[in-house]
Amino acid sequence: MEAAGELVLYQKLKFWEPRMEWEEEEEEGKEETLEPLIIYASRPQVSPWNKAGGLPGAWARLVAALLLLAMGCSLAVRQFQGKSSSAGSLGSGAPPASRHSHHAGEYHHGAIISPAVTCSHLGQQLLVDGGNIVDAGVAAALCLVVVHPHATGLGAMFWGLFYNSSSGNSTALTPGAAQPLAPGLGLPTALPALRLLHAHFGHLPWPRLLMDPAMLAQEGFIVDAALAKALAAQGTKGLCPLFCHADGTLLGLGAQASNPKLAAVLHRAALASTPDLAGDALLSLLARDLGLKEPTAGPTPTLEPALQLATPKGILFTTPAPSAGPELLALLKAAPHPSKPSPSPCPQLSQTAGSPVSSILATVDSSGSVLLLTSSLNSSFGSGQLSPSTGVLLSNLVSRSATSPWASPLILRGSLDDPETDVLGLVASGIPKASTAVAHALLSHLAGPKTQTHHRHQDQQRPTEKPSICDQGTLLQVAAYAEHAHVSSVPSGCCPFQGF
């Protein structure tokens, strides 16, 4: 486990703007035109040109004036052409021809991918504002708590996997054993888990991460396709009036929803000075709301070293039990060395009624640091029981369902002997056993052509953009190589990405 006081710092980098280049060229032009050109108007000095046989003094002054005039005209033309060129690029919004272009999902500095465009944009903005990938990932997870309550929430259980390229260490966020808050209702662990992760590895102040999610909950958010589909399947049971119109009908695609009570909880959590207080504040409200005695033992999330497996391709990292991480490593250890992708490597898995519903997101920076987060309420909308005074949907993750088959994030760090070590992150959701999909995606990636060096960037094998995935789940893939960050997903349009 890494030292508690370690911070992962990232330099704040600015977006390129055509206006900035125009200003730079204009400044260069100013420096050129303002260069001192001194004409001495004092009485003629004795010089070879003024001596007998030389050019008369009047002619010398005339020639000098003409030369100065020609130089001034040349500089004026250069400045005018520079401004015209910059104005043209400003109008088109395109970078100058000298700058290389990027493929979709490829960024210079960092990127985030999540199931909701609002949350991906929120995470990107934190990166631009000087945060690191832990800040971006935790804030995006809190955003998903608000806009995707069918798949995650403050009542959910979170697993995480963080690879720190600065130290070379990989750390697992574990939620602790699932505990019942009441019969059929799981003890919420999201807030203390995310707060713990941020306290050890985040950079921006904790309240900054909750500011935008709280504003979304207070002022409203648009129901996207994923939430609309889940609402239509769930019906109105337990979800009104939060997700219903005034006449009792469910909100549909494009409608605006809000959760002011949840906003108040997030505001209160922003004031918590320790991870324990972040959880205690919510538990106190829930106990009062449900008429229960406050639990004597709160949630117990921890940070611990990730499981490791050395392979010829590098070192694999994943989360410990009771996640599906050990099962994932067992699958990879038993798999033959991949020489080429199998035409049909996936077993036929059916989505059963009892399969867990989960939410995933991933962040990466060009230095190779990766954060993968996965969470679940167990079933869609969890227990379906909404706490009226907190706006929190409680999960039905209890002790008898302590194993988390939906949690098997994986990070592959290439060999440290390679000066351009690649880092790959994979996380899956929406299938009975995420470990099967992640194992297959990794084997397909390893069976592909090797990545070339940065100097042959245009000929590189980019991270697998469309690896097949077992059944109909969702797979997120992030990678860092050749000083760029890369993000992709399967299906390709499932999860919006943002970067810079």
Image (tube, rainbow, N blue to C red):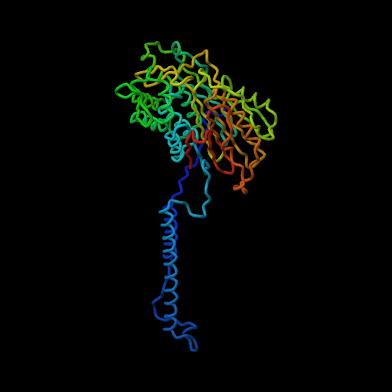
Could you say which quadrant of the image residue 36 lies in?
A: bottom left
Q: Picture coordinates of residue 191 (x, y %)?
A: 44, 24
In depth, the one of 370 and 376 nearer the eye is 376
Question: Would residue 424 be found to the left or right of residue 28 on screen?
Answer: right
Q: Residue furthest left?
A: 246
Q: Is residue 341 left or right of residue 108?
A: right
Q: Nearer the viewer, residue 186 or 383?
A: 383
Say which of 255 and 314 sits in front: 255
Residue 78: image location, x then y, percent: 45, 65
Locate residue 442: give its quadrant.
top right
* Residue at image location 37% in from the left, 11% down from the top: 291
**The N terminus - image quarter:** top right
> Whole-percent x and y of residue 230?
43, 24
Residue 288 x, y percent position in the rendering: 36, 14
Q: How many marks?
A: 0
Where 276 sits versus 37, above or below?
above
Residue 395 lies in what quarter of the image?
Answer: top left
Q: Does residue 448 sit above or below 293 in this rendering? A: below
Considering depth in this image, is 301 or 74 the residue closer to the camera?
74
